[in-house]
Amino acid sequence: MSGPDRAGRPAAVPPAGPAAPGSGAPGPGVPGPAAGRGAVAGGSATAVRFRSLLDALAPIGRDPASGGYRRFGWTAADLACREWFAGEAAARGMDRTVDGNGNLWAWWGTPGPGAVVTGSHLDSVPNGGAYDGPLGVISAFCAVDELRDRDVTPARPVAVVAFADEEGARFGVACLGSRLLSGAIERDRALALTDADGTSLADAMRAAGADPRAAGADPEVLGRIGAFVELHVEQGRGLVDLGAPIGVATGIWPHGRWRYRFAGEANHAGTTRLADRRDPMLTFANTVLSARKKARLAGALATFGRVTVVPNGTNAVPSTVDGWLDARAPDEVTLQELVAAIGQAATERGQRDGVEVAVSTESVTPAVAFDPTLRQRLVAALGGGAPELPTGAGHDAGILAARVPTAMLFVRNPTGVSHSPAEYAADADCVAGIHALAAVLEDLAG
Ligand code: GLV
Ligand code: MN
Ligand code: MN
């Protein structure tokens, strides 16, 4: 797989928020891509393992038309990814456990408190890329391999984790596995969420052989996590602009999802005078434009990336349009004001159009500042030169940060493109990420 070269794109997140003080170059403690032990022909052992794990996942849930991934929670593609995880755990003699929320764990050492946990997720957005999520899980397994190659015996248990349904592509709420585990979403509300076909999370779990009665906050499993470090492909152009392969996250912008229902009146496209229409598409379109303008003025982000239209006929004025707003901002007040202003604009426009507007909140994630002590430990373990930077992308690490010491490593994304089949990271940078993660695990677990 080769990456597109689209240098010059604007950053996915404006360079606002906490300062990014790094030098822009990896520190002396960040080994280069070929620094792993046990080099084999064609590259280091780590480079070869990385490529082989990524290639093994590559066909799973890949949409041949777009080349993107459709690995939605509890679908056949998700189950195939789960089997892949089980195989990788078994190949390493790691004990695999599955918690009541469908999160997968592979243990090096006895499961118990004080564990150093690393991993990410295996599900995807619609037509997602190969790296968002899987890179963190693959890197976790490869970092364990690297430590074992070096005969490191960790004093604390180390666990690789793959959280369930991080993207929320099927049931609407992101980070369901980590939210349920940590009690950030109420169990009954989560189990009652439905997908586009009306299947509930509870039924989807049952159909996949999981028992939804076991879902919910799990203090015992959560209590095992002494520290969580998630490695992730960067989803903007922060590192490429700094010329650094690896960075440490400072925090995550507050963000959320809101469902807008625009209800008008279905009618004939060829006979209904414009003045007589109650067209929800018109109100929706104006709301999209208004959200864009208000976000720009606030230094924030607002996106309507999903829409359903009823009856969805070329020659019919729609009766209903549902649109989902994703909004993110550098701080919580800006986010609240932005979301309120978009809602008000939609309602006012709806009154002009004869369209009723109803807004419901699907999820809100507050601002996250990663644990400062753990962050500093990561920076030090990487030799002191790794840049620190914020992100507008959500992660399981952001959910867990409210409950356990949590940090993140980012791997350079040369185009900044993510949530797209064009998402890409160079193998050499991914291998540098694995070396960095191994150094962090050795420091934290050693
Ligand atoms: C997850 O990738 C998100 O930020 O929506
Ligand atoms: Mn994502
Ligand atoms: Mn992700």
Image: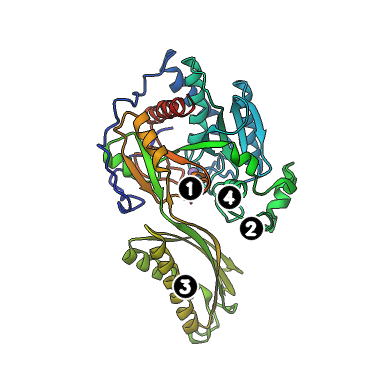
Q: Assign a secondary structure to mark 1.
A: helix
Residue 279 location (% of width, % of height): 52, 78
Q: Is mark 4 within 8 Å of ligand 1?
A: no
Mark 2 vs mark 1, CA separation in Å:
26 Å
Quadrant housing residue 423: top left
- What amino acid is at disc 1? Gly
First in residue order: circle 4 vs circle 2: 4
- What amino acid is at disc 3? Gly
Q: Nearer the viewer, residue 205 or 335?
A: 335
First in residue order: circle 3 vs circle 4: 4
> Which is in the foreground here, disc 2 or disc 3?
3
First in residue order: circle 1 vs circle 3: 3
- What amino acid is at disc 4? Arg
Q: Is residue 373 above or below residue 278?
A: above
Label placed on residue 179 = 4
Q: Nearer the viewer, residue 129 or 278?
A: 129
For the question of whether residue 175 can be seen, the reply is yes
Q: Verify CB contact (< 8 Å) between mark 1 and mark 3.
A: no
User: Which residue carries the number 2 mark?
Assistant: 196
